[in-house]
Amino acid sequence: MITGKNYIGNIRSSEGTKTFTTFNPQENKRNTSVITEASIEEIDKAVALAANAFQVYSNKTGLEKACFLRAIADEIEALGTALIEVYTSESGLAAARAMGERGRTVGQLRAFALHIEEGTWVAASIDTAQPERQPVAKIDLRKMNIALGPIVVFGASNFPFAFSTAGGDTAAALAAGCPVIVKSHPMHAGTGELVASAIIKAAQKTGMPNGVFSNLNSSGIEVGQALVKHPSIKGVGFTGSIRAGRALFDLAAKRPEPIPVFAEMGSVNPVIFLPEALNEKAVDWAKIYAGSITLGAGQFCTNPGLLLGIAGEGLNQFGLTLAEEIIKIAPTCMLHPTICDAYESNKAKVVSQEGVSVLVDYEDTSQNNYGRQIVSKVSGAVFLENPTLHLEVFGPSSLLVICKDAAQLVQIVNNLEGQLTGTIIATDSEIAANPSIVSALQNRVGRIIFNGVPTGVEVCPSMQHGGPYPASTDARFTAVGVDSIKRWVRPFSFQAWPNNLLPAALKNENPLAILRTVDGVKTRNKI
Amino acid sequence: MITGKNYIGNIRSSEGTKTFTTFNPQENKRNTSVITEASIEEIDKAVALAANAFQVYSNKTGLEKACFLRAIADEIEALGTALIEVYTSESGLAAARAMGERGRTVGQLRAFALHIEEGTWVAASIDTAQPERQPVAKIDLRKMNIALGPIVVFGASNFPFAFSTAGGDTAAALAAGCPVIVKSHPMHAGTGELVASAIIKAAQKTGMPNGVFSNLNSSGIEVGQALVKHPSIKGVGFTGSIRAGRALFDLAAKRPEPIPVFAEMGSVNPVIFLPEALNEKAVDWAKIYAGSITLGAGQFCTNPGLLLGIAGEGLNQFGLTLAEEIIKIAPTCMLHPTICDAYESNKAKVVSQEGVSVLVDYEDTSQNNYGRQIVSKVSGAVFLENPTLHLEVFGPSSLLVICKDAAQLVQIVNNLEGQLTGTIIATDSEIAANPSIVSALQNRVGRIIFNGVPTGVEVCPSMQHGGPYPASTDARFTAVGVDSIKRWVRPFSFQAWPNNLLPAALKNENPLAILRTVDGVKTRNKI
């Protein structure tokens, strides 16, 4: 079923000479399908097809694009258990997780379908002419969002469905009217090929132009680099490490025509525990956080890697209970031996830092590639001085920082790098009494959480997934939710344009019945 | 009245040792006021003040910020003719232009005041909790736009008011809740100081924190570079040349924490003349374009520098009449000898290219620093082969390109770099019959104009001022109109946050009565 070929538009192709295989971390052995890396010629073909497809696809109506997105969702579901089996064999993740993530992925596609079918998202704005205005006449001007051009999406290791081939970036770009070329993640290239086949089938069934989607395999960095440098590519979506994301950002910034790179990268997702809340519920919070830290073997970008509290009885109790609870949880398989190896070496690095002590460390190494949880402890003073302790440890690891007082806690938060999320565990009176802590945290994050956990990213319009660098390369956008479509469009104005040639969203008659800004007022009225 | 000092927050300061003077191009002599360049210590102080001010200013209500913006407008008007005199003495521009531009500038400030007072611009989105949802409860999530942080604005040579000290970038950033540090343009540092004094006065009258605004002088690139590299600066606004804008973009992209640079740069603003329209009205269009090319000595970013047509009688007639008409127009003074010198040398460079012939050239050189108009002519084939002819000549110059047919015209448009505007002169039937020309132009520009001129940038919500690179560094935003506020904000989510501690825009009661997205539906209702 897996051919190992690329999709260059609608055509399966394997002209390259470099091949690789994926790995089953649960069984600790290579999978058998041989994947062929895309050649430079294939990359060029895919981009040329995308550039041509853009001229047609960007003019498709919301309804037409919605049909396409829904067909993709249907075709993914039609792949049934075969897809789930390949997913689990390439990720070490359980079938239940695979099915949940598939649900999220098709849900995202259908949410975007609804969004673009309704149509208000184009932000249509109309200023009507005032020919009599003095000293000069006002000319009719109409603005809306239009698609940016062909987009490259990099598959993410930790979300083979939801942030990969037909994941959020792809769904958002296709919804916007941009053709997409996916640089498939090498760890789950087979899963990627199957999902790509669903997209291609959907494109053909709904009459989308050849080149609206391509899927390229690669085990190294060359294919991705060639794509980002290609003059016809107009934007990049990426989810992964800071090192790789920054490299792509730098490459795109150095182009003769720089292009936007939306990279969602590392985060330690600080959690602040205030004393009263711990005095009331230290044990409850410890149990909840034992679960959040180990969820999905800690391989979520919102994993709570940094726990901050003020020295005292409550924090002691919390630390002890967290250690007791987290050790009860059975470790689970990580995505790949390289990810597990990196986790082990990053853990060792943290533990070897002066002043760091281990609260609890899961020691049984009998299962290959399993993420063994660890919680370490350090004083606020040491943490402030040692930037190594600020780095993300990708896996089920967390560092408890014991601050001497609230002032030191604020100082630590002010010195953190940008984060996706920040959480405050506090009583109602405590949070009201600590505006300086809230304000410091707000400056460093994209989403702030009260008495909860950062894991669990709801896909809904009010979600901001993205934050100050290095959480993402452009905090002005979100990677999750329908607003993520805004990354792949640009506003465009028509001046004195004939009504019959205007896009439907801007015509006098408002045929789409969308909410528009007309002479500064929001309305669904005709003109 | 001009002290030549910087404003480091509310304090006039001149600790630096480097000084310079401005130049009166009409009188061809230096002005007398001595301007002192900001020192590194002063830069650091201004940024530190801005970072502190951000904590207070970003939490001001829309109403409070609106009062501040209106007070700035009032204080600028209160400077009266003294300000107009300094403006004309530093720019060579006429008093009428100065007054018009002042009107636009205070108009922009008041438009932003209205915009933030109304408040819907924060794009409030609320997803209410669904505690009973299966398989997991949905948690309350609320999102709105918040200010990015301290912003640096670079004054533009060609708009001493509207794109400088209290210009569009400053107004938008202050409206968003961001403190602003202006790197004043050295050509009109005196004007800058006066406008800065109005801002400082307004800030003090309306109780804004010290550091919400600073104004730094500089004749070289060091001050600007130090500002863009400063870790506490979170965004940059720039209007000027491609070379300078790209240098700032590169500098910002190389920072440990890259920051957005919104640079509005060069544009030749192609105008396409289709045959029927010229057959009907060649003379009328020639007269109109003679005016547009020479408007403001051609020193507008929307100046039509490239005229494209298809060989034929109509185009011949147009070219001849344009030459006749444009020579009748009296040249006007350019902004500075260096700008006039650059103009002369760029003109000479174009004219010296093989295959370029001069249609008309204003020869009288008796007036110093005046921009002498020129129109040259070249074939489509030569234009395609010679990138030098694609470059912007800043001044009253335009190049008429004679294409052999519509296919060559489309090819030329496809090969153009990104532009602020593109214009099509056509009959109704002609424009409907040429979708490939329209579509090619649309891909290269931010605003498309039917039967008009690109000069004259209406300040209204439907204006897109910005386009594909190098028209601007990020085509996803506009530099003109209230939507330009979007450059200086980021979305921010509150999860399960106590209602009494939420910003007013997100409270259940909707105390601001703004339009919000609640569970996916636009409404002004309470929750």
Image (cartoon, coloured by chain):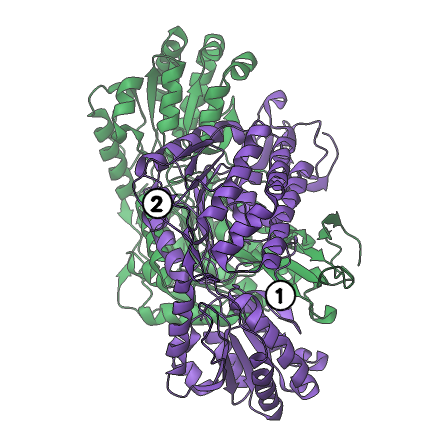
Chain colours: A purple, B green
> Looking at the rendering, in which quadrant would you find the N terminus of chain B?
bottom left
Residue at 62% across, 61% down = B493
Residue at 39% across, 78% down = A348
Kindly identify which chain the residue marked by label 1 belongs to: B
Res. A226 in view: yes
| Residue farthest to the top, as pictured | B313
- The residue where tag 2 is placed is A223
Q: Are marks 2 and 1 on the same chain?
A: no
| Residue B115 percent coordinates (x, y) | 64, 50
| Residue farthest to the bottom, as pictured | A313
Above or below residue A419? Residue B77 is above
Instruction: Indicate the quadrant where residue B219 lies.
Output: bottom left
| Residue B496 percent coordinates (x, y) | 69, 67
- The residue where tag 1 is placed is B60
Q: In the figure, is residue A182 to the left or right of B463?
A: left
Q: In the figure, is residue B365 to the left or right of B502?
A: left
C-alpha distance separating marks 2 and 1? 48 Å
Question: Residue A215: which disc?
Answer: none
Amino acid type of the residue that numbered disc 1 sits on in the rendered structure: Lys
